[in-house]
Image (tube, helix red, strand yellow):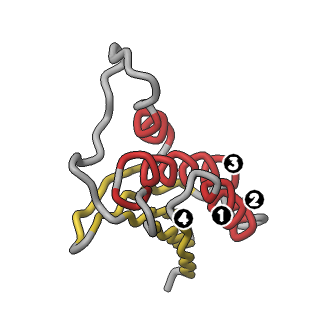
């Protein structure tokens, strides 16, 4: 059975740094820390910027699952008007490339619509020492 941790964060931009620290502290000596920190940073930033999690009294959850071969980083937000999607490389919008970055090095990623929100996740390979 994989180990699992969950923590709730207020939907404020400065809380993204706290989410990064949470993940880094859990994965120290256990997994791909730098990649996991990048993943949670992108997903938490998206939750705060693009969903109701970033509104007054909003919040987001970070879930870390540690299996034998994979680390799954999941951010559960309060939903929004758009679904998570990869931006085209030719898009000239500021930002919008975080999921493309995650897709480039994660083994797998995706999202699940839930009542009152959604979950966006990425799976990273754990390299044995």
Tell me the CA gap for discs 2 and 1.
20 Å
Q: Can residue 128 be seen here? A: no
Relative depth, front residue between 65 and 84? 84
Between discs 4 and 1, the one toward the N terminus: 1
Residue holding disc 2: 129
Residue holding disc 4: 69
Q: Is residue 122 above or below residue 65?
A: above
Between discs 2 and 4, the one toward the N terminus: 4
Between discs 1 and 3, the one toward the N terminus: 1
Mark 1 Cα shell of 10 Å, populated few (<14), some (14-19), many (≥20): many
Q: Residue at x 46, y 29 (%)?
A: 95
Residue holding disc 3: 34
Q: Are marks 2 and 1 in contact (CB under 8 Å)?
A: no
Tell me the CA gap for discs 3 and 4.
17 Å
Relative depth, front residue between 85 and 126? 85
User: In the picture, residue 87 is in which quadrant?
Assistant: top left
Q: Position of residue 127 (x, y in %)?
A: 65, 55
**Mark 4 against mark 1, which lies toward the viewer?**
1
Q: Position of residue 50 (x, y in %)?
A: 37, 47
Secondary element under disc 1, as helix, strand or loop, is: helix
Q: Is residue 79 left or right of residue 76?
A: left
Tell me the CA gap for discs 1 and 3.
10 Å
Q: Can residue 19 be seen here? A: yes
């Amino acid at each position: 059975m994989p180990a699992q941790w969950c923590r709730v964060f207020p939907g404020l931009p400065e809380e993204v740094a706290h989410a990064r620290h949470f993940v880094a502290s859990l994965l120290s000596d256990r997994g791909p820390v730098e990649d996991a920190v990048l993943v949670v940073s992108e997903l938490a930033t998206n939750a705060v910027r693009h969903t109701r999690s970033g509104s007054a009294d909003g919040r987001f959850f970070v879930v870390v699952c540690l299996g034998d071969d994979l680390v799954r980083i999941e951010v559960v937000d309060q939903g929004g008007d758009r679904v998570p999607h990869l931006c085209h490389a030719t898009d000239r919008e500021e930002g919008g490339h975080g999921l493309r970055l995650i897709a480039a090095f994660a083994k797998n990623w995706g999202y699940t619509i839930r009542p009152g929100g959604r979950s966006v996740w990425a799976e990273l390979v754990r390299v044995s020492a």
